[in-house]
Amino acid sequence: MSHPLDLLLSRVQKPARYVGGEVGAVSLGTAPELRAAFCFPDTYEIGMSHLGLQILYGRMNQPAWMRCERAFAPWPDMEALLREHRLPLTALESGDALSAFDLLAFTLQYELSYSNVLNMLDLGGVPVRSAERGGPWPLIVAGGPCALNPEPLADFIDIFAVGDGEDVILELTALLREAKREQWDKPAILRAAARIEGLYVPALYTPAYRPDGTLEALTPSEGAPETVRRRVVSDLDQAFYPTHPVVPNTAVVHERVMLELFRGCIRGCRFCQAGHVTRPVRARSPETLARQGIEALQNTGFEEIALTSLSSSDYPELPALCDALLDYCEPRRVGLSLPSLRADSFSRELMERVQRVRKSGLTFAPEAGTPRLRDVINKNLTEADLMNACAAAFGGGWTAVKLYFMLGLPTETGEDVTAIAELAHRVFLLWRRTTPDKTRGVRVSASVSLFVPKPHTPFQWAAMESGGEFRRRIDLLKAACRKQITLNWHDPDTSYWEAVLARGDRRAGGAIYRAWQSGARLDGWGEHFRPALWQAAFEAEGLDPDFYALRERGPDEVLPWGHIDTGVSRAFLRREYEKALRGETTPDCRTQCAGCGASQYGGECGVERHA
């Protein structure tokens, strides 16, 4: 059977992005009652490296009455050809246009992918604005971390899924199956969907604004709840895991099995959205993990398995799990990696066992250069912790250490900035003191991201630094770094617009639409990002982007995302922000319960697990 894009494939850079047919992809078979397409608003290489795609794709293909396919954002060369030949963006499995599906499910992993969502809809033959789509099909749904502030995309998405998606997506699709059988109209579908826990229907809410531009209220109608409670999968041992994932047919970012140890985090870093919105900690058992990991390796042929979580070294049964996996991996030359380690729980013995097949560099995240600022962000990590971990690594033969920091954290001073360079240099001096054989050299790198205040964190009220101030601090850090340190930093413009969209309200949707119409595409890729285009779009809508990114929020201000209930209370977040400004820390959940509120969702709090 010929592919709809056959005539175009020879004219694009990476044709394998668009053809499908991979091992593990769903077979078409007979026509299902409900057709869905999982849409990843970035390129194939990014999307196929994402565990969430594999989980939801597999989960949605479990019911016999539904089939889920995949679609990805095209690279500009393919988009130009599609528009030139008036061909639609299609799903990989069938080659059908996105407009032919009943459900299009987008995942929102990064704010700068918003323009890709609009572009994929348009290329797929689907009207971009919800109000322009007359009938119910296709229904547009979106989930993922950015759905925790759904308002900037409220004009384009029919339903947002908030929280873990494995169960709520099947409840929604069962509803859509019934609606399709009984020929419900779109308003009836939306009203019914709003009654499912974890689903937010923006058309049923009306925003009102104060004269100063802040949000006054978001008023529900037609029985929609005032707050939307996040969905949580409490038992990960019973949750779906893709032991038969789709194996990419071209190089992707992460060519490996990803084994999810647990969700949630006990640590409480105040800048970290993921650590707050995925509480409480819910872990898989080592027996389940070993079985799932080995099955996935057998079914894919991958030569690496990564143990993923927000802080893998916090998994209590990690040594036993690694031993069980290594019994399978080591004879087969399959690498085992731990990409998320804390310096205060680094074990040289464990890492030597894990990296018997191949040894990679190590990454630690002090986040700040001074103890004072680490207390502000509640990192609960000392310089001694870092130095002990690096000494153990150097003693074990490691010659590459990457250190992650952030610039622009609340209360940061010039001394905090230069301390980043000084701390990195002390790591280099530690290697020189403790390593007799220096013939191999060492690589110490400092990678610096720029602080973006995110919703549902203690810092959601904080102001972001301006681009000019970030550039000044980057120059200060560059001047302080010695030649032995490799320094990398994020682009201030990219971080600024990430903050604008992360903290935007529903009015930002008009600017997103204008930016897309003006050519915004693939904004997460540096070579395609044009900040001037976004600035012009906001100005044309009469909006000041500084209002969203650079403004300190008042303690009683109605926040655009305030109707989304993640389980962590606003009162707790505010207490944490005030403690941050005083430089006070909060113990991790394993030591003492901080009363965040997430226990309402069940699971196991760290303090309960180790009581």
Image (cartoon, grey):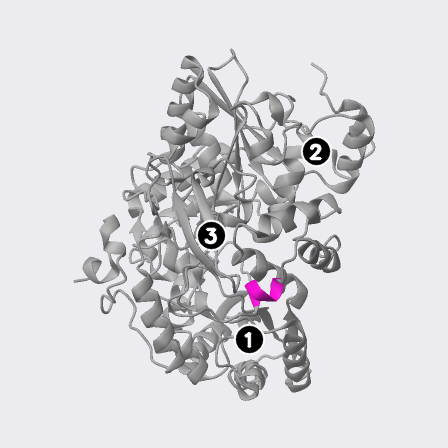
Query: Which percent across, then down, holds residue 32?
Result: 48, 15
At horizontal 71% and vertical 27% (from top left) the residue drawn is 88
How much space separates mark 1 and mark 2, taking CA atoms?
41 Å
The amino acid at mark 3 is: Ala
In the rendered structure, find residue 408 and report the number of the disc placed on it: 1
Using the image, determine if residue 253 lies above or below residue 165: below
Using the image, determine if residue 157 lies above or below residue 425: above
Quadrant position of residue 465: bottom right
Element at label 2: helix
| Label whose residue precedes the other's in the sequence (2 or 3) | 2
Q: Residue furthest top?
A: 30
At horizontal 25% and vertical 60% (from top left) the residue drawn is 606
In the rendered structure, find residue 16 and report the number of the disc placed on it: 2
| Label whose residue precedes the other's in the sequence (3 or 1) | 3
Query: Which percent across, then down, holds residue 125?
Result: 67, 27
The amino acid at mark 1 is: Gly
Question: Left or right: 137 with respect to 458?
Answer: right
Tell me if residue 267 can be seen.
no
Q: Which residue is mark 3?
A: 208
